[in-house]
Amino acid sequence: MDEKKTSEQVQNLSEQFVELFVANLLTKNHVDIQETKKRVTEEQRAQLKTTVEKLKAQVEEFLETNTVKKTTESDENVVGQAVNPLREAFIERKRKRENKKMS
């Protein structure tokens, strides 16, 4: 559930970023958005839509692999952690107590 919510937030954020970037680019180059929309053909719109869908898919795939990679790395860190001498002493003490109880 959290991953889905996070994914939606990332998607919304990326959409806002793209809109801001495009608006800034068009404003910087003195492009009239309404006039440009009128000149775009249906074929060009379809191509833009396809490109955007491909980019979305790539971003989602990247985010998924990145999340899996982070999870794997964190699991490896837990398994490969150096043993803390104090922790080891507590574990050994607990084992001795359990062995005395069983005896």
Image: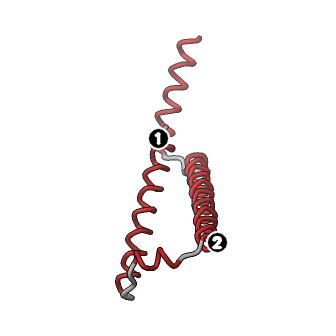
Residue 17 left/right relative to 4: left
Looking at the picture, tell me which residue is in the foreground, 70 or 67.
Answer: 67
Please, is residue 98 above or below residue 2 in the view? above
- Amino acid, disc 1: Asp
Quadrant assignment, res 15: bottom left
The residue at which mark 2 appears reads as 43
Q: CA distance from mark 2 to mark 1?
A: 38 Å
- Residue drawn at the location 50% of the way across and 43% of the way down: 4
The residue at which mark 1 appears reads as 2
Residue 20, position in %: x, y? 37, 71
* Labelled pair 2, 1 in contact (Cβ < 8 Å): no
Mark 2 or 1, nearer chain start:
1
- Numbered disc 2: secondary structure: helix
Image quadrant holding the C terminus, namely: top right
Please, is residue 82 above or below residue 101 in the view? below
Residue 78, position in %: x, y? 56, 46
Residue 65, position in %: x, y? 62, 56
* Circle 2 Cα neighbour tier, 10 Å, few/some/many (<14 / 14–19 / ≥20): few
* Circle 1 Cα neighbour tier, 10 Å, few/some/many (<14 / 14–19 / ≥20): few
Please, is residue 73 above or below residue 42 in the view? above
- Numbered disc 1: secondary structure: helix
- Residue drawn at the location 56% of the way across and 53% of the way down: 67
Q: Nearer the viewer, mark 2 or mark 1?
A: 2
- Residue drawn at the location 43% of the way across and 51% of the way down: 9
Looking at the picture, tell me which residue is in the foreground, 9 or 53.
Answer: 53
Residue 33, position in %: x, y? 40, 77
- Residue drawn at the location 55% of the way across and 50% of the way down: 74
Residue that sits furthest to the bottom in the current view: 29
Please, is residue 64 above or below residue 30 in the view? above
